[in-house]
Amino acid sequence: SSLDYPRDERNLETISNIAPTNEGFLLFAPPLKSPNKNHVVLCNYLKTSSDELRDYKQQGIRTTISLDDRDASSDEPFEVANRIATLMDESGGGDFIFVSSPDGDDDDTLRLCEELSYLDVPGPIMKSRLMLDCPAETTSEDLVDEVMSLGVNKFVVYKETQVQDCIQEVALEQGKQMVK
């Protein structure tokens, strides 16, 4: 949705100001008049220019590059990773990278996570920026296991039961601890 009315922005700013500092809000919106350190704008990697990402960065808004509607049949994972690296290098944006499986294609998603984890871009290492989308009905435990083995430690879940049923189980099998 868009922040069409001043009260929408005021409400979001109020929530952001009272939220814990480690929380972020994903925004599908134009640049805000008074950005807050808790704002994170979700930017589609095919539709967002490096200039737009740079503008967000200059306003103090963190950016998440979204790979949620890529066409797996036309883009090889290394091509997507190269495009992401170029976008990040040119803009300084890309605090997080949101990866989802197109049509539940675990192999393609794993290859993409591998390619992205190899990128050497300024700032935090790529593994710490990656977030794997885990829709309950399509995410396999094997994918979570493989991605977690790569060093990815951020997973977007939709149901609280997923944390225990899948992610926590895989983490314990790998000798890792869950931090909430």
Image (cartoon, helix red, strand yellow):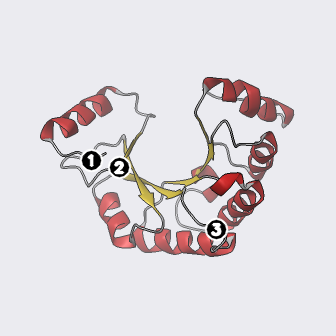
The residue at the point 24 percent across, 30 percent down is: 14
The residue at the point 74 percent across, 57 percent down is: 110
Name the residue at the left extreme.
6
Tag of residue 2: 1
Q: Position of residue 85 (x, y in %)?
A: 55, 71
- Say above or below: 110 vs 179: below
Q: Position of residue 137 (x, y in %)?
A: 68, 38
Q: Is residue 121 left or right of residue 167?
A: left
Tag of residue 62: none
Identity, as a three-letter code, of the amino acid under mark 3? Leu
Q: Depth check: give the residue in front, 138 or 124.
A: 138
Q: Is residue 42 visible?
A: yes
Mark 3 or 2: in front is 2
Of callouts 1 and 2, the N-terminal one: 1
Mark 1 or 3: in front is 1
- From mark 1 to mark 2, how far is it between C-alphas? 6 Å
Of callouts 3 and 2, the N-terminal one: 2
Q: Depth check: give the residue in front, 58 or 96.
A: 96
- Callout 3: helix, strand or loop? loop
* Contact between labelled residues 2 and 1, with CB atoms less than 8 Å apart: yes
